[in-house]
Image: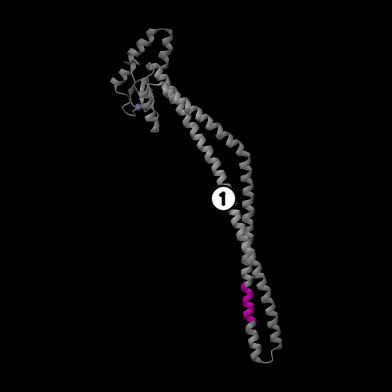
Amino acid sequence: MGIDAQIDSLEQLATLDAVLKTLVEKLGAQRAEYTALKASHATVETAIAADRASLIEMERTRSELQIDHRNIGQQLDRSRDRIQRSRNERESQAAERELDELRRLQRDRDDELGKMIVLCDQVRNAIADNEFKLLELQEKLSTSEQGTLAQIQALETDVAEKRSGRVAIIARLPSLMGRRYESMHGRGKVPVAHTTDGTCRGCYVQLPPMLFHSLLSRTQFGECPFCHRIIWYTAPVVASALAEVGGEAVDSSTGALS
Ligand SMILES: [Zn+2]
C-alpha cells in the first residue's frame, strides 16, 4: 500500500472518527435526557405516594383531635352543671378548678386542631401540585418517548455502522500504521495531522525544517515532535490547482518552500 493510499485511508479514518465522536456525544445526551425524564417521573410519583400516606395519618390525628374536642366540650357542660349544683364553697371551688383545667385543655386542642388543618391543607396542595407535575411529565414522556427512543436507536445503528466502517479501514492499513493510529485514538487523541507550510496543522507549532523537508516528497510519514501526531505533507490548494494547468507552477512552489 503506497503512501498516498495510506494517507487517503488515514484521512477517511480521521473524518469517520470525528463524526463518530459527535454521534457518541449526541447519543449520550439523548440517553441522559431520557433517563433524567424517567427519574423525575419516578421522584414525583414517590413524593405523591409519601404525601398521601402522611395525609391519611394526619387526617386520622385530626379526627382524633376533633373527638377529643367534643368530649372536652361535654365534660365542660357537666362541669358547669356541677357548679350550679354545688352545695358548698368547697364543691363550687373544686368545680371551678375543673372548669378552668378543661377550658385550658380545650384551648390546647383548638390550637392543635388549627395547626393540623393548616398542615393537611399544605399536604393536599403539595399533592395537587405534584399531580399536575406528574401529568406534564407523563405527557412529555409519552410524546417524546417514541421520538427519543427512535432517535437513540437510529444513533445506535449509525454508530455501529461507522464503527464497522473504521474497522474495515484499519484492516486496509499496514498493521503497524493501524496500531499506531489506534493507540493514539485509544488515548482520546486525534492521531493524524498534515502540514502544508511547515506548521503542524494539529498543534500549530512550526516543525523542524529537516522534518518538514523530509515530508515534502510524500515518500514517508513523520511524527510531529510536539503533539506526536502522524504527519504528512499536503500540497497547498492553489499549488494543486495549478498542478492541473502545468507542472512548472508546482515545481516553483515546492522549490520555494524547500
Ligand atoms: Zn503537532
Give the structural element (helix, strand or loop) at label 1.
helix
Instruction: Residue 240: give x, y in percent of width and height.
Output: 41, 13
* Residue 106, quarter of picture: bottom right
For this view, does 58 lie left or right of residue 199? right
Q: Residue at x 64, y 67 (%)?
A: 62
Q: In the figure, 253 relative to 174: above or below?
A: above
| Disc 1 residue: CB within 8 Å of ligand 1 | no
Query: Circle 1 sits on which residue?
Result: 43
For this view, does 257 lie left or right of residue 122? left
Q: Quadrant of ligand 1?
A: top left
Coloring scheme used? one colour
For this view, does 48 lie left or right of residue 186? right
Residue that lies at the very extreme toward the left in this rendered image: 210
Q: Is residue 153 rendered magenta in the image?
A: no
Mark 1 residue crowding within 10 angstroms, few (<14) / some (14–19) / many (20+): some
Instruction: Residue 149: give x, y in percent of width and height.
Output: 58, 36
Q: Nearer the viewer, residue 17 or 99?
A: 17
Q: In the figure, 242 relative to 41: above or below?
A: above
Instruction: Residue 199: give x, y in percent of width and height.
Output: 35, 23
* Residue 142, quarter of picture: top right
Give the residue type at disc 1.
Answer: Thr
**Image quarter in which the C terminus is found:** top left
Majority secondary structure in the magenta region? helix
Which portion, as a residue range, is magenta? 99-108
Q: Is residue 100 rendered magenta in the image?
A: yes
Instruction: Residue 155: give x, y in percent of width and height.
Output: 53, 32
Q: Residue at x 29, y 23 (%)?
A: 208
Q: Residue at x 62, y 48 (%)?
A: 134
Q: Is residue 51 visible?
A: yes
